[in-house]
Each structure stands twice: as structure tokens, then as C-alpha cells.
Image: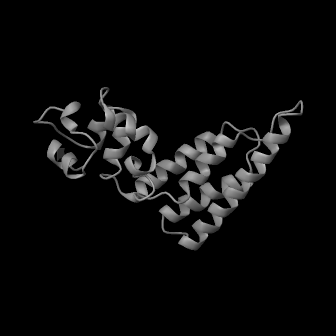
């Protein structure tokens, strides 16, 4: 694994200087950043997303989505299929068109289960699967460095770090 310095982090133009959490002579890798108990979690992800290959990031997202789906008694098959396609795409076994088709199917699953959840609010039985797991699936399908540039995409979360 490559070693980095605090200046390497500065070159990525974070919204605050990394010396807030790291000493000037810091040297480390992605694991060092992830293990640091003082760096906020979202900032850890923001830093290492630049240091890890897209394949690794996508496979990690697939793993997270599968873990979320394991909490669902009867997950929507479109969500499971979306994980399968995302994993195949990471391994070079699926096309961008396959990925887009799976993303659209996962979005349809979210819409369907959202309607089920709304109907269940007036019923005595819960909806068939929690929307949170489906949101995780829909998030991972278009996963790329572009999609997780959190200072631009998650402005509400990032604002708290930039304002401090």
C-alpha cells in the first residue's frame, strides 16, 4: 500500500487543513487514516476514496449493501440482483448498460416498497422490507469516485466540518 503525507492530503483540497487532526510530519496509508480515532468518519472516507481503486470501493459498497439486505427477512429480488450486477461490474463481467438497468430496477424496488410502507402506516403489518436497505442498494449502483465526492454531494454533513 502506498504511503502518503499530510501534504498529499492538502493537494486534494479538503475544506479544512488536515493539521486539525494530523501532525505536520504525519506519514501513513489508507488503513492509518481509517484507524485514527480522532478523524471524523466522513472525513476518513473522503480521504481514502482518493487512495483506493474504484474496484475496491465498489466491492466494499456491495459488501455493505449485502450486509444491509441480510437484515431484511424477504429482500426484494431486484435489490439482490443489483448487488450481483454491481459486483460483476467491479470484476469486469457486466457493462455500464447492465449497471444502469440494475439501478433502474433497484429504483423501482424503492418506489414499490415506499408505497408499501405508506400503505402499511395504516395497516397492522409492517412493510415487506425496510427502505434503508433499498436505499443502500440504489446508492451503490452508480458508485464511483464522482458519486462519493462528499464535500460537494453531502453538503449538509460537510458544512459542519467546514464551519468549525
Relative to 23, 86 lies left or right: right
Q: Is residue 33 above or below residue 92?
A: above
Give how far across and how far down residue 113 sits, in percent: 76, 47
Residue found 88% across the figure and 34% down from its top: 122
Residue found 55% across the figure and 63% down from its top: 88
Q: Report if residue 95 is visible in the image.
A: no
Q: Is residue 111 above or below residue 131?
A: below
Q: Quadrant of residue 126?
A: top right
- Residue furthest to the top in view is 37
Quadrant location, the C terminus: top left
- Residue furthest to the front in view is 163
Nearer-the-camera pick, 89 or 136: 136
Relative to 64, 152 lies left or right: left
Give how far across and how far down residue 108 sits, in percent: 72, 58
Q: Report if residue 19 is visible in the image.
A: yes
Relative to 21, 50 lies left or right: right
Nearer-the-camera pick, 82 or 17: 17
- Residue furthest to the left in view is 25
Relative to 64, 29 lies left or right: left
Give how far across and how far down residue 82 sits, in percent: 63, 57
Amino acid at each position: 500500500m502506498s504511503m502518503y503525507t499530510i501534504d498529499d492530503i492538502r493537494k486534494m483540497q479538503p475544506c479544512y487543513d488536515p493539521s486539525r487532526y494530523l501532525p505536520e510530519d504525519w506519514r501513513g496509508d489508507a488503513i492509518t487514516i481509517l484507524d485514527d480515532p480522532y478523524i471524523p468518519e466522513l472525513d476518513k472516507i473522503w480521504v481514502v476514496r482518493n487512495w483506493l481503486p474504484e474496484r475496491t470501493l465498489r466491492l466494499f459498497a456491495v459488501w455493505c449493501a449485502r450486509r444491509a439486505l441480510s437484515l431484511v427477512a424477504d429482500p426484494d429480488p431486484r435489490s439482490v440482483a443489483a448487488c450481483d450486477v454491481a459486483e460483476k461490474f467491479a470484476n469486469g463481467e457486466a457493462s455500464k448498460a447492465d449497471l444502469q438497468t440494475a439501478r433502474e430496477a433497484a429504483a423501482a424496488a424503492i418506489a414499490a416498497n415506499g408505497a408499501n410502507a405508506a400503505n402499511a402506516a395504516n395497516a397492522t403489518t409492517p412493510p415487506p422490507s425496510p427502505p434503508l436497505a433499498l436505499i443502500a442498494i440504489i446508492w451503490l449502483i452508480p458508485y464511483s469516485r464522482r458519486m462519493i465526492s462528499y464535500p460537494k454531494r453531502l453538503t449538509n454533513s460537510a458544512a459542519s466540518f467546514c464551519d468549525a
